[in-house]
Amino acid sequence: MDNLKREMEFAARLAEEAGAITLRYFQKGIEAQWKADATPVTIADLEAEKLIRERIRREFPQDGILGEEEETIPGTSGRQWIVDPLDGTKSFLQGVPLYGVLIALEGPEGPVVGAIGLPAVREILYAARGEGCFWNGRKARISAVAELKDACLVYTSFRNFDKAGPRFAAAFERLAGAARICRGWGDAYGYALVATGRAEAMLDPVINPWDIAPMIPILEEAGGTFTDWDGRRTIRSGNGLATNGRLLEAILKLASA
């Protein structure tokens, strides 16, 4: 794919613009509607996604769009933008700043551009295949930790491991017991922590494609990995695992024990 630097810079700018919309409503006591899958949606989600879709359709009219809150728009280019305008809406509603805006570009070989905007903590990560990964404008790199006993593992909700089934619940117990520290700094923020060397792995047993679409380019360009819990490089298995690469084999081994 050509012009990935252009698309990367576009995704980063757009994540920041959409993030600014969410900040207008953050810690303002807004109400949420609850969807059939028991997840909330707010006016901040809807306005941010509207902006993202408008910008993409204007700049890249031949590309498709897949988003969490609105219908899929087919494209003719063989490329698709995947967006989550407010990842971590439950944190957002609690007034907790660990939520993000996610934007990715997917080609025939998978996601090749990704951006994670974290407006409430003033962070932005963005990457494109072959262009590197950037954190607030400087190069992002994974940590050098090589053993689980020295690692920090993060996740979104321990309830999700039970929800995903006995395999994931048992794996979580083994992994949490093997790590130096295990904390619920989850949603998009957890992946950002791994890509910037502040955590070694992010464990996601229940996930949708729009929740993780930017993670392949961001983690890989930062030197890490994004796979599912069987080690496959995909965003469509219903689960996700980010690591600093050095711990991938050990985590997969414990996850399948």
Image (tube, rainbow, N blue to C red):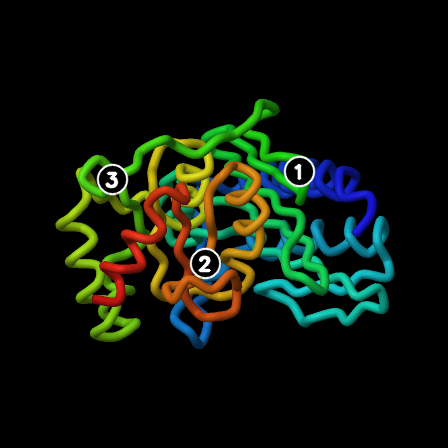
Disc with the residue nearer the chain's start (3 vs 2):
3
Q: Amino acid at mark 1?
A: Ala
Identify the residue position indicated by label 3 in the image: 147
Question: Which residue is depicted at the point 41% across and 50% down?
Answer: 242
Q: CA distance from mark 3 to mark 2?
A: 19 Å
Element at badge 1?
A: helix
The number of discs equals 3
Numbered tag placed on residue 12 in the rendering: 1
Name the residue at the top extreme. 138
Q: Position of residue 72 (x, y in %)?
A: 69, 71
Mark whose residue sits in front, 1 or 2: 2
Q: Badge 1: how crowded within 10 Å, few (<14), some, or many (20+)?
A: many
Q: Badge 2: how crowded within 10 Å, few (<14), some, or many (20+)?
A: many
Element at badge 2?
A: strand
* Front position in the image: 244 or 24: 244
Q: Amino acid at mark 3?
A: Glu
Quarter of the picture containing the C terminus is bottom left
Identify the residue position indicated by label 2 in the image: 227
Question: Which residue is depicted at the point 85% across and 52% down?
Answer: 58
Q: CA distance from mark 1 to mark 2?
A: 23 Å
